[in-house]
Image: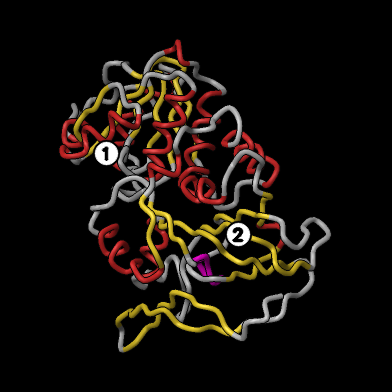
Amino acid sequence: MSKQATYKAFRVEEIDNTYVSTIKEMPFSNVTEDELLIKVSYSSLNYKDALSASGNKGVTKKYPHTPGIDAVGTVVASKSPKFKVSEHVIVTSYDLGMNTDGGFAEYIKVPASWAVKLPKNLSIKEAMVIGTAGLTAGISVLKLSELVKPEDGPIIVSGATGGVGSMSLKILKKMGYKTVAITGKEVEINFLKDLGADEIIMRKDVENMDKRPLLKSIYAGGIDTVGGVILENIIKSIQPMGVVTCCGNVASPKLDVTVFPFILRGITLIGIDSQNYPMKYREKVWEKFASQWKLDQLSDTATEITLAQLKEKIDLMLQGKLKGRTVVNVN
């Protein structure tokens, strides 16, 4: 247990119907049965964190609150037989940073069932470059790769400059897949090429595709992070027996397609829920990141910031002006 009386946290408060963020000193609370107290080394910035920090009640119901759905650090107090003091652990998703105070703080207290031991051959910073976005990408690629192989054809990825999209491109390249990236940002074409995209198409061209129930079958699979018309047109462009995973709805939660892609081409649509992904599969994905999917110079690909820089980056994320991964050094 820390000998400090308080610790620093990025707190969001509701004041006169506006949401104000400041770094505050917070008191420790007792660790109870099957809980861990973790000294956080890094967190990362995700879209859900930006929503929580701006008062989205669909993400966080009560304020004051500390966002941060990702954290990696060292166990300093344990009431669980599974974890020992001084072990490095990763905590991503579940309720962390949503209605439970999250990783934008020097310490977090969480149920032991939320924690994964940091795999060997993976650094604490690499774990947060991956984070929930990487975990979501990893689950998506794992599911897709069970049914579609690199020789079957290209994989199309939407929201390609975002956290999930950019990590998906990296993993797919590592596994030998040809990839096509969808983006609305012409200025990021070189960034996407550096991630491993073999081809880049603009979002407006995908949105304006023909309204027919089926389009020319081009792609063996797809990883969609945005939903809406983009997802609809990806589904309609998939080859027979192809696979599409979906994990986001920032464009729209609605899906306006016929059954034809599914019954005439045998398309499989797989929904991805990394928030409550079962622990045994979660551990499998993390081990892959430390072995077969080990990404070169991963830490160098992310932007590192401090707690004091969070508000600026959150505003940019909400404006769609961030790319890749942003990790938060809470120390």
In the rendered view, tell whether residue 10 sits above or below residue 234: below
Q: CA distance from mark 2 to mark 1?
A: 40 Å
Instruction: Give the residue displayed 42% in from the left and 66% down from the top.
Output: 58
Instruction: Give the residue displayed 44% in from the left and 65% down from the top.
Output: 59
Amino acid carrying mark 2 in the image: Gly
Residue at the far right: name it.
Answer: 81
Q: Which residue is mark 1?
A: 229
In the rendered view, tell whether residue 211 sits above or below residue 304: above
Q: Which residue is mark 2?
A: 73
Amino acid carrying mark 1 in the image: Val
Label 2 SS: strand
Residue 41 at x, y percent in the picture = 54, 61
Residue 153 at x, y percent in the picture = 39, 14
Q: Residues within 10 Å of mark 2 (few under 14, many from 20)?
A: many
User: How many numbered marks appear?
Assistant: 2
Q: Quick check: marks 2 and 1 in contact, CB under 8 Å?
A: no
Which of the two discs, 2 and 1, sits closer to the camera?
A: 2
**Magenta-colored span:** 97-103
Residue 20 at x, y percent in the picture = 33, 80
Residue 60 at x, y percent in the picture = 46, 70
In the rendered view, tell whether residue 319 sits above or below residue 243: below
Q: What numbered label is drawn on residue 65?
A: none
